[in-house]
């Protein structure tokens, strides 16, 4: 056992794509160093902060992918979990003076409970109904926040809780929180990869493929779906809780709870490669960096008098939709397949060559067309 | 909170009539085409702003504005279907993402082009009618028009050839095409109808309250509740659902807390989904 584990973890014996992945991760970890070389002074620091925020968006996208990408239960409201983790942790810290680390832990537990509350009904709901419930759940939370804006700050959010780590100066703060984000990013990536590559992960994929077949083979799909929801919610809540304790974010609806946040993580995962975790992380980071770069563009759209920066989300969505039509399996899968054919190592696909998007679409199609066409 | 009951009831009846207009369009598209149109709320906003630009900016009469509030959203809806949805209507997730993104785009463009301050649209009718202590003539018009439209729709669906074809398509696309019905054309009709209804509702919402870039969100979410409560695909269910949700909303806002708007209906939606997902009058989804 230990033999296979060491060989599994030895970088030299890994397949090429995983070696490339590790290399990319190492490059990401060294961001502060090459940013320093590329840009002088504060410009470099600002870019490091952009990457830090991007890593958190990547974590949000991974958490969505671990449930929706694997089980095919499309959640339209994952922002709910980020918000419960983030707001929960911030309020515990501000209201009761709970130290940040403990507040983060408690916020994560709260998010896990929310995952259980959404995951259990998910056993009964099918396809679009689950999407509708998850679409509505964050709206309910937002209504509650507006209703009790004395506690939750309504549309403006809560003030910043204590920072996770004490720092002095802008530069030190930037570096410290980059590595806080990076450590969490690696942790979440490792946990989600381990789970989705385990036997449990195979069962989740099987649920996406054919739930009845899973039930027929004596496994309880409900149990695994709940597990996926709780795992995903805790990971999302943890990322949200740590995020609000960094100087780059604060507990506000626009950063944690808005509908656009839920949509962003879906777009990111589908773009990067639904059902791959790594693709979701890439998609999330790319989306975040792309949008922040776009919002710096000062050019105006001719005829509308609207600046390009203000339309960043719209432009991004349009770009995404084109990619969605062109590469339905996501950029990561496309890269791996293209890379393989380039080096002549093309193998047969074990899943019959259907992408998770196609499998999930199939399920939804059956639901929508159910009893009508045949 | 000492609002006279009669005023609250009058308000609830009028708002319910408006919600019914929005929800019928939503359920038509879902029931006939099997498409969850999350851009339906944005269509409401487009209706309100079409009326605003026609009447307040270009200086036409508000009746011309009303015409614009029907035509522009109808065209928008048709363009949305023809341009995007038709190509992906078999991919429900893509449809949901696409329509949601369209809604965000419409909202953003109105926000950037018009600004965030509310726009005031003049009433179609002014003055009061002396029923039950005086009701705004405009509100009465909303109520009457809503029922006229519902009546016409029922008549059209059940007694005209095109209406029957739409009904047939909603029951079985394959069966409908076997008897020579072009389902694509039927889908287009439902999108145009839904767009026109939503636009008209937008006009009234704008003249009763005000028009703003985010005004379509609440009606969209209420439509979810109404359509799920009434049963997806059932027009009758949508009308009844609209009145239940309309009354619930108005009473919660008038007697409990005005900042609770939207919350009660969302809770109802979740409860219905958990307890009876097919709704009051919905077809059972068969395996």
Image (cartoon, coloured by chain):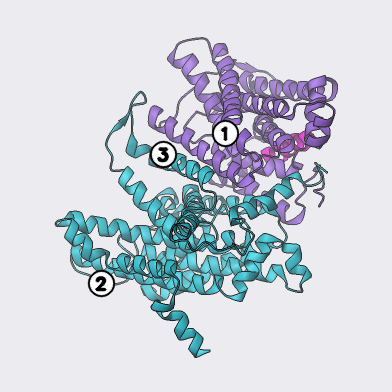
Q: Residues within 10 Å of mark 2 (few under 14, many from 20)?
A: few
Residue positioned most to the left: A40
Q: Tell whether A167 sits left or right of B63.
A: left
Q: CA distance from mark 2 to mark 1?
A: 51 Å
Position of B223 relative to A6 (above/below): above
The residue segment tinted magenta is B235-248
Q: Tell whether B3 sits left or right of A241.
A: right
Q: Give the dominant element type of the magenta stretch: helix, strand or loop.
A: helix
**Where residue A315 is drawn, which disc sits there?**
3
Tag in front: 2 or 1: 1
| Chain the render paints purple | B
> Could you tell me which chain the residue with mark 2 belongs to?
A
Q: Quadrant of residue B91?
A: top right
Find disc 1 in the rendering and name its residue: B84
Find disc 2 in the rendering and name its residue: A166
- Residues tagged 2 and 1 counted as in contact (Cβ below 8 A): no
- The answer to whether residue B134 shows anywhere in this view is no
Q: Residues within 10 Å of mark 3 (few under 14, many from 20)?
A: some
Secondary structure beneath dot 3 equals helix
């Amino acid at each position: 056992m230990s033999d296979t584990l060491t060989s599994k973890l030895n970088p030299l014996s890994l397949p090429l794509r995983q070696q490339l992945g590790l290399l990319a991760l190492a490059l990401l970890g060294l961001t502060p160093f090459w940013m320093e070389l590329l840009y002088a002074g504060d410009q470099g620091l600002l870019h490091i902060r952009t990457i830090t925020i991007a890593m958190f968006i990547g974590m949000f996208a991974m958490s969505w992918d671990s449930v929706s990408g694997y089980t095919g239960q499309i959640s339209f409201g994952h922002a709910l979990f980020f918000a419960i983790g983030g707001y929960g942790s911030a309020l515990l810290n501000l209201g009761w003076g709970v130290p940040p680390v403990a507040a983060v832990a408690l916020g994560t537990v709260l998010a896990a409970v929310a995952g259980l509350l959404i995951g259990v009904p998910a056993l009964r709901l099918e396809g679009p109904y689950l999407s509708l419930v998850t679409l509505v759940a964050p709206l309910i939370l937002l209504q509650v926040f507006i209703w009790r804006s004395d506690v939750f700050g309504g549309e403006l959010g809560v003030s910043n809780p204590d920072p996770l780590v004490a720092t002095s100066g802008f530069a030190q703060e930037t570096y410290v929180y980059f590595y806080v984000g990076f450590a969490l990013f690696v942790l979440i990536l490792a946990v989600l990869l381990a789970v989705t590559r385990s036997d449990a992960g195979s069962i989740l994929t099987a649920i996406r493929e054919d739930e009845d077949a899973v039930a027929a083979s004596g496994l309880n799909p409900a149990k695994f779906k709940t597990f996926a929801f709780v795992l995903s919610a805790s990971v999302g809540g943890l990322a949200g809780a740590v995020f609000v304790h960094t100087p780059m974010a604060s507990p506000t609806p626009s950063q944690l709870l808005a509908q656009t946040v839920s949509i962003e993580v879906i777009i990111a995962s589908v773009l990067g490669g639904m059902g791959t975790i790594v693709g979701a992380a890439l998609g999330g980071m790319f989306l975040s960096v792309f949008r922040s770069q776009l919002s710096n563009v000062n050019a105006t759209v001719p005829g509308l008098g609207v600046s390009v920066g203000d339309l960043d989300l719209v432009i991004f969505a349009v770009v995404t939709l084109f990619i969605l039509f062109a590469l339905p399996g996501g950029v990561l899968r496309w890269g791996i397949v293209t890379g393989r054919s380039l080096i002549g190592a093309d193998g047969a696909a074990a899943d019959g060559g259907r992408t998770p998007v196609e499998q999930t679409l199939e399920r939804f199609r059956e639901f929508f067309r159910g009893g009508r066409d045949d | 909170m000492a609002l006279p009951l009669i005023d609250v009831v009058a308000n609830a009846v009028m708002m319910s009539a408006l919600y019914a207009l929005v929800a019928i369009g939503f359920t038509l598209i879902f029931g006939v085409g099997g498409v969850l149109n999350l851009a339906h709320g944005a269509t409401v906003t487009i209706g309100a702003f079409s009326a605003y630009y026609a009447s307040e900016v270009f200086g036409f009469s508000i009746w011309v504005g009303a015409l614009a509030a029907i035509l522009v959203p109808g065209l928008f809806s048709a363009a949305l279907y023809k341009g995007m949805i038709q190509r992906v209507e078999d991919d429900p997730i893509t449809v949901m993402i696409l329509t949601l993104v369209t809604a965000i785009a419409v909202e953003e463009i109105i926000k950037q082009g018009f600004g965030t301050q509310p726009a005031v649209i003049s009433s179609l009718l002014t003055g009061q009618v002396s029923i039950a202590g005086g009701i705004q003539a405009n509100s009465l018009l909303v109520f009457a028009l809503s029922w006229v439209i519902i009546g016409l729709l029922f008549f059209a669906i059940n007694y005209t050839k095109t209406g029957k074809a739409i009904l047939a398509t909603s029951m079985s696309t394959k069966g409908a095409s076997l008897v020579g019905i072009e389902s694509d054309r039927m889908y287009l009709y439902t999108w145009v109808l839904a767009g026109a209804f939503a636009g008209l509702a937008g006009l009234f919402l704008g003249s009763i309250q005000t028009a703003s870039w985010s005004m379509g969100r609440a009606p969209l979410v209420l439509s979810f509740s109404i359509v799920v409560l009434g049963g997806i695909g059932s027009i009758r269910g949508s009308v009844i659902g609209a009145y239940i949700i309309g009354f619930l909303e108005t009473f919660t806002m008038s007697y409990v807390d005005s900042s609770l708007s939207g919350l009660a209906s969302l809770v109802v939606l979740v409860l219905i989904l958990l307890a009876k997902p097919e709704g009051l009058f919905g077809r059972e989804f068969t395996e």
